[in-house]
Image (spheres, rainbow, N blue to C red):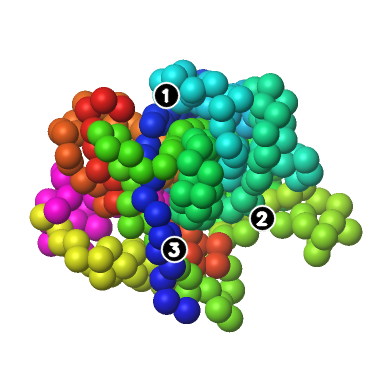
Amino acid sequence: MAVKFAQHDLSLYSIAHQLPGSHIDNETLLNCLSKQAGRLNARKAKSIAKRLGIEGRYLVRDLTKATSFASPTSIELSQQVLSQALSSANITAGELDYLITHTCTPHTQVPPNAAWLADVMAYHGPYLELRQACTGFANGLQIASAFCAVNQQPVAIVGVETGSVYFDMDKAFIDTEQLVNYVQMGDGAAAAVLGPMADGKAKISDIYLGQIGHQKQPGFYLDSGSNDVGEKRMARFHHNIHAVREQGSQLFELGWQALQSRGYQLDDFAYILPHQANGHIDVLMAEALGITPDRIINDAKQLGNLGSAAIWVSLSNLIHSGKLNEGDKVAVLGAEATKYLYGGFVYEHRLCI
């Protein structure tokens, strides 16, 4: 099936992001692993971290314990970012037509994060949740595009991940794929308030989504669904490193081809914002596109891979950095390794946001 473009553009009223706790560098992360799981595992993790280029991250877990509760929880993080975004947009929760959330590390499987978030925000309207990782934002935008065009009311999208609690610092749990997860992933949340297209507003356009996952084994998945609860073990993320390496670059290429099909060229964009898969993303993508690395956003080096929250966090970080001028465009190229999805959009900046 060809890539799917949403029919309607959106105005971005506001965006906010939140990272939990204090910044955790590799030395701290690896020292904690060494104490809990031995020096050998810490040495392996150090080697993996160097290859991935991840130097730091923010986490909701307690690193002094083998397993940990999330603090803050995904609901607390979501409440913080949504409150900030609504305040910046001068909109109350009650004025939202719909609340959309997406995550692959939910507070509870059922009810979804959206239900818990609606409770703490005193939001009485409809909500839905996408159980999706790194392209959850793209599906959320496809839905928001249709809702806003029909109802002419604002919607909010919240992406959050608190996946660090899925790692058990126990030698029986740890293997190479789990060490990749440990050093690569981070926690965080972001919220965007969007509305129907209006003059003078920051613009999200050319919203696209595609997938090439047919008959392919997932590159990344979370177990403990109905397929395997009988094993009575801790839920864990599985990471098929080789499959991701083989398919990952193709997803970015397909995303760029999708934007080219709309008539865009590299010179149209002040920045390229790819999914934050690793800390070398700026150099790797710059080489592929033939441009300088300073035009590629690389937050992964200091934040890690934030999964479902990654694109929103990086876009929020860029918008609030002051680097963008009036009318600057950003090409967003999302990629998801679960079943090989690609999605993104074009962001056009307005100084009033």
Q: Residue under label 1, please give it.
A: 89
Mark 1 vs mark 3, CA separation in Å: 27 Å
- The picture quadrant where one finds residue 262 is bottom left
x 19%, y 61%: residue: 264
Local crowd size for mark 3, using a 10 Å CA cut-off: few (<14), some (14–19), many (≥20): many
x 49%, y 23%: residue: 91
In this rendered view, identify the residue nearer to me: 154 or 257: 154
Q: Decide: is 208 above or below 306.
A: below
x 51%, y 49%: residue: 150
Q: Earlier in the sequence, mark 2 or mark 1?
A: 1
Q: Residue under label 2, please give it.
A: 222
The residue under label 3 is which amino acid type? Leu
Q: Decide: is 78 above or below 146.
A: above
Q: Decide: is 324 above or below 246.
A: above
Residue 56's x, y, as percent? 40, 34
In this rendered view, identify the residue nearer to me: 227 or 94: 94
Residue 209 is marked as 3
- The span shown in magenta is 268-294
